Image (tube, rainbow, N blue to C red):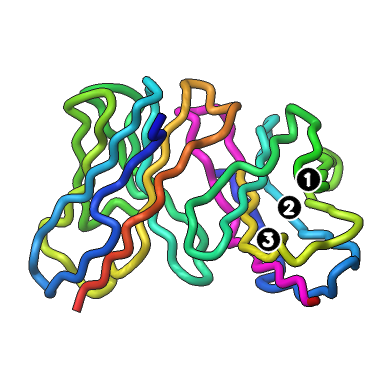
Amino acid sequence: NAGVTQTPKFRVLKTGQSMTLLCAQDMNHEYMYWYRQDPGMGLRLIHYSVGEGTTAKGEVPDGYNVSRLKKQNFLLGLESAAPSQTSVYFCASTTDRGLGGYTFGSGTRLTVV
Amino acid sequence: AQRVTQPEKLLSVFKGAPVELKCNYSYSGSPELFWYVQYSRQRLQLLLRHISRESIKGFTADLNKGETSFHLKKPFAQEEDSAMYYCALTTGANSKLTFGKGITLSVRP
């Protein structure tokens, strides 16, 4: 049982480059989330999805796009990376009430130079 | 909108000392509160939930609706408790979690 798997684990991008972060979960969870973690800022919600084919903006969505074509996968895209997007990105999933807590992936450490 | 406040960034204690990590929230309804822990360069893990009233690894947290607080406590800290701790809240809407900024707990030998 893998839980939540994120790929890649590390990436260095040049300003203006694009990339996609993949999150996959095998728990049949409806809800999936992308957060970024920055020192002194905690975790901030970028985008989330309440089910296959649906996405919504979180607290800091600018510069990011997402897609949820399959229930088990949630993709986060950066179309034109900026140094301000240097961060650690975490994906999480939960059941529809979330009372059992989130299951997190191991994170993607992204550096934009 | 809901908010979670963790007023301290760092707490450093000696092994065996009591620990209290503060968490205050603002929300007009009845939220669900959580504590998450992140050990060095690892993923976040759920530590405990207020609805289950459980004790995990010796940690407990009591929801005080009057003071809108959900402080995390442990009577005797261990070195392996050194980690980043996040308090989080959900209102149930889309199960979104709002996190505090986190506090680093350092337990010295």
* Label 1 Cα crowd, 10 Å radius (few <14 / some 14-19 / many 20+): some
Question: Tag 3: residue type?
Answer: Gln
Mark 2: secondary structure: strand
- Measured Cα–Cα span from mark 1 to mark 2: 6 Å
Q: Which residue is mark 2?
A: B24
Badge 3 and badge 2 in a common chain: yes
**Residue drawn at (50%, 28%), measured in percent from left and top?**
B93
Chain under callout 3: B
Q: Position of residue B51 (x, y in %)?
A: 73, 28
User: Is the residue under label 2 in contact with that under label 1 (CB below 8 Å)?
Assistant: yes
Calculate the distance from the C-alpha at mark 1 to the C-alpha at mark 3: 12 Å
- Give the labeled residue for mark 1: B68
Q: Which residues are magenta?
A: B89-108
Residue B102: say if magenta.
Answer: yes
Residue B18, by quadrant, is bottom right
Res B6 label = 3
